Amino acid sequence: MFQQGAIPYLVVLGVIIAITLLFRLRTALIRQEMNPVIQIGNGQTIGRREEQDDYFSTATSSHGTIAVLADGISGLANGRLASTLAVTTFIREFTKLDNPKHMSLFFSRAASLANSEILQALRGSRGGTTLVAGVIVEDKLYWGAVGDSIITVFRNGEFIPINQKDIYESVLEARFLSGEITKDEALEHPQKKQLINYLGYDNFQNIEIGREPFPLEKGDKVILCSDGVYDTLTEMELEQVLFQNIAAHDAADQIIEAVESKQKANQDNATILILEKGW
């Protein structure tokens, strides 16, 4: 039996343990409020291609949740190799990130490394990939993009475009605005959809990075998709799915089903990622 003099010490010890447990519980709840679970949905179809050149991945760390999607260029060989290397490089570098304040440096470094690794793997062969990456930290979206895959935020029934496409159409638009060419010449140019920047390119330019993180609101859905999705479905068709009160993975499945239902003879690989933040 315990000596009577030891009882007060046991009481004090019990109080200390209880306070410690309550403090840890409070800290965990605060962290959960600051970084709530991100609901992730993804869907993919090979379409009518012989190979799936799209590649994607997601990861969560103490700093936030990342989603990366790369669309290997079908017109070049080694599209699958390029997209896989790009995504794995971004995920690898994200796991090394020690401070979310360094997010811009992360995007530029990961893109440079991915481009170098793809070129090294290609050994002079032709290949390349687009890439879009989004990182949700608390209520902010950090992002980077190169090529013609897109990041957009679905809010209150409307799409808010985030990145610009690296295609020749943007050059034509600038030439039209400067008076060098007519509107019809810009619209009807046969190479307007041609990529002018991508990973796995000797003359790779900088990845586009948001100067400031995009502030997210309650109910926002962050969408990453390849051109196989947005070239097949209209915004209205996408809105009809995303406006439903369903889980992110169900929405992604429905969008891919809608793509496949079109039964396009030349259907490209199509991939979509949906990130919805819990509140």
Image (tube, rainbow, N blue to C red):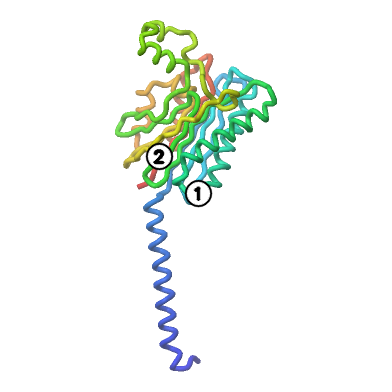
Residue 133 at least partly seen: yes
Q: In which quarter of the image is residue 185?
A: top left
Residue type, label 2: Leu
User: For residue 174, which numbered disc appears in the image?
Assistant: none
Judged left or right of residue 205, residue 181 is left
Q: 103 or 50: which is nearer to us?
A: 103
**Residue 91, position as x, y percentages in the image:** 55, 41
Counting residues from the N terminus, which is met first, the one under dot 1 or under dot 2?
A: 1
Q: Position of residue 88 (x, y in %)?
A: 59, 37
Q: Residue furthest bottom?
A: 4
As drawn, the label of residue 61 is: 1
Say which element carries label 2.
Answer: strand
Quadrant in which residue 11 is drawn: bottom left
Q: Disc 2 marks which residue?
A: 141
The reply to whether residue 259 is in sight is: no
Dot 2, crowdedness within 10 Å: few (<14), some or many (≥20)?
Answer: many
Identity of the residue furthest to the right in this view:
123
Q: Do the residues labelled 1 and 2 touch (CB within 8 Å)?
A: no
Q: What residue do we see at 49% from left, 11% from top? A: 191
Count how many numbered circles sit on residues in the image: 2
* Residue that appears at 32% across and 34% down: 155
Q: Where is residue 222 in the image (x, y as percent from the top left)?
A: 40, 35
Pick whichever, 136 or 99, lies toward us.
Answer: 99
